[in-house]
Image (spheres, rainbow, N blue to C red):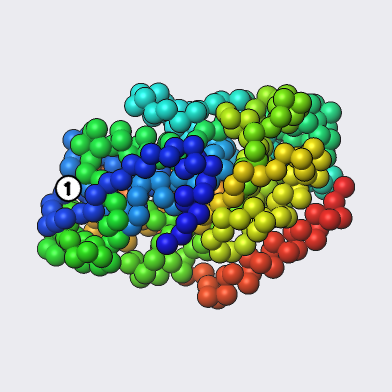
């Protein structure tokens, strides 16, 4: 079992575990959802509120995967600029996707407010920082593109950015005022509770090991032999996809995103490191991201070992990067470390597939999933209850395609990380 879920700072802050029982079966439900992360729990909540009977089956417990142990940042949007989607998808379809993706944090905040989830939500904004002089043009172009769509993003020159972060290592960047941060584990557990209150049956320790079509129903069987019949099924396992759906695991790269949490910052650093409490993510192939949480701990993440880890020593490159930005951190020390698998797709965009009659999957948030995956729960629920068709989901439906040489993905990730760190050593 992956122990990193237990060592996240979010789990340490919440010592009382919430355990959902395994499916006893046999059971019948209108909708079955495989995966108890943000996508599945949000879809379950909205479908149950629409009057459907919903059952969530999670291999471990809700929030166990990357949903409960990411960096906690709320970044509006997607990998590419808004105009890119308009040009590629056309005005109507592109606008549908842009409207949802760049309003995802607002949509998430509305869910949190109306369901009363206590997850330390803050909306101080998100900073996109240009690490090298060569990065400025691309970052500034993105800011201009977003401004053209009426989005609240302000350019920050080097001195203005230095005041917001507490160092002068960046060349410039922009602030998206809609962004923010939160405790992702508390969000996941809050979504589970809200979905349960709306009538959803949630079962942990219930890995689905087989899925077959039987007339008008799908039959799901768990590792304990319990069965569930449902008319429609949503599979949302993201970086933890297995071989349940043939070809799904080969259509994404399960990259480990690693996170360090410092000990609480001393008084002399509380007002100097990220004093406005914005979140930040850097430009570059291998993104570094960080924020200071509500307990005054620096939470910084990036790429680390491509295996589970609970040791701060395993994340020394991330620690060295943090200490290069704020040398005083050498005396603060690290409280804990953890990682989790996120799904990266070939085009760095989410993929939605209508696999069969009543069988759907959505995955591949590429590190932007906290707000986006939760916001997508509402249109997915409308699909599952029959209010809309698959072609009305904001993420355009596509055919699942395996990634070439998928078996060698760990070597490719290691090479990308090594190249990025080499370039970083020559930056500025």
**Can residue 34 be seen by looking at this rendering?**
no
Q: Residue at x 71, y 29 (%)?
A: 266
Q: Residue at x 70, y 43 (%)?
A: 333
Q: Position of residue 123 (x, y in %)?
A: 56, 25
Left/right placement of residue 294 relative to residue 424 reads left
Q: Which residue is mark 1?
A: 30
Q: Residue at x 58, y 30 (%)?
A: 295
Q: Residue at x 35, y 36 (%)?
A: 191
Q: Quadrant of residue 411?
A: bottom right
Q: Position of residue 256 (x, y in %)?
A: 56, 58
Q: Position of residue 348 (x, y in %)?
A: 56, 55
Q: Position of residue 349 (x, y in %)?
A: 53, 52
Mark 1 closeness class: few <14, some 14–19, many ≥20 residues within 10 Å: some
Report the front residue among 68 and 347.
68
- Could you tell me which secondary element the residue under label 1 belongs to? strand
Left/right placement of residue 287 relative to residue 68 reads right
Left/right placement of residue 149 relative to residue 387 reads right
Q: Quadrant of residue 143?
A: top right
State which quarter of the image contains the N terminus: bottom left
**Can residue 72 be seen by looking at this rendering?**
yes
Question: Is residue 358 shown above or below 274?
Answer: below
Left/right placement of residue 3 relative to residue 159 reads left
Question: Is residue 211 shown above or below 18?
Answer: below
- Total labels: the figure holds 1
Question: Is residue 221 shown above or below 315?
Answer: below
Report the front residue among 358 and 344.
344
């Amino acid at each position: 079992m992956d122990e990193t879920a237990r060592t996240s700072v979010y789990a340490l802050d919440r010592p009382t575990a919430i355990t959902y029982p395994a499916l006893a079966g046999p059971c019948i439900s209108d909708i079955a959802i495989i995966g108890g992360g943000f996508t599945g729990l949000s879809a379950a909540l909205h479908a149950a509120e629409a009057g459907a009977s919903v059952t969530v089956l999670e291999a471990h417990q809700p929030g166990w995967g990357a949903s409960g142990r990411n960096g906690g940042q709320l970044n509006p949007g997607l990998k590419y600029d808004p105009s890119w989607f308009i040009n590629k998808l056309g005005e109507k379809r592109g606008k549908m996707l842009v409207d949802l993706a760049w309003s995802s944090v607002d949509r998430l905040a509305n869910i949190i407010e109306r369901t009363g989830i206590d997850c330390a939500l803050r909306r101080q904004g998100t900073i996109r920082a240009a690490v090298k002089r060569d990065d400025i043009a691309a970052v500034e172009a993105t800011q201009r593109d977003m401004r053209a769509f009426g989005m609240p993003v302000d350019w920050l020159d080097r001195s203005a950015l230095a005041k917001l972060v507490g160092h002068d290592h960046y060349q410039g960047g922009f602030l998206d005022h809609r962004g923010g941060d939160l405790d992702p584990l508390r969000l996941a557990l809050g979504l589970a509770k809200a979905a349960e209150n709306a009538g959803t049956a949630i079962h942990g320790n219930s890995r689905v090991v087989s899925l077959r079509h039987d007339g008008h129903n799908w039959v799901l069987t768990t590792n304990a032999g319990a069965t569930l019949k449902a008319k429609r099924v949503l599979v949302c396992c993201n970086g933890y996809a297995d071989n349940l759906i043939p070809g799904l695991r080969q259509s994404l790269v399960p990259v480990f995103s690693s996170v360090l949490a410092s000990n609480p910052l001393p008084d002399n650093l509380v007002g100097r490191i990220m004093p406005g409490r914005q979140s930040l993510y850097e430009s570059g192939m291998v993104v570094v991201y960080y924020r200071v949480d509500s307990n005054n701990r620096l939470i910084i993440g990036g790429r680390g070992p491509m295996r589970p880890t609970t040791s701060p020593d395993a994340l020394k490159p991330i620690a060295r990067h943090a200490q290069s930005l704020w040398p005083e951190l050498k005396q603060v020390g690290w409280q804990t470390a953890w990682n989790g698998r996120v799904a990266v797709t070939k085009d760095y965009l989410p993929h939605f597939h209508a696999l069969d009659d009543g069988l759907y999957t959505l995955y591949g948030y590429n590190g932007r999933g906290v707000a986006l995956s939760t916001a997508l729960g509402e249109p997915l629920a409308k699909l599952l209850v029959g209010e809309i068709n698959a072609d009305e989901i904001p993420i355009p439906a596509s055919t699942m395609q395996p990634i070439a040489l998928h078996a060698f993905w760990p070597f490719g990730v290691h090479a990308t990380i090594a190249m990025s760190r080499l370039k970083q050593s020559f930056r500025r």
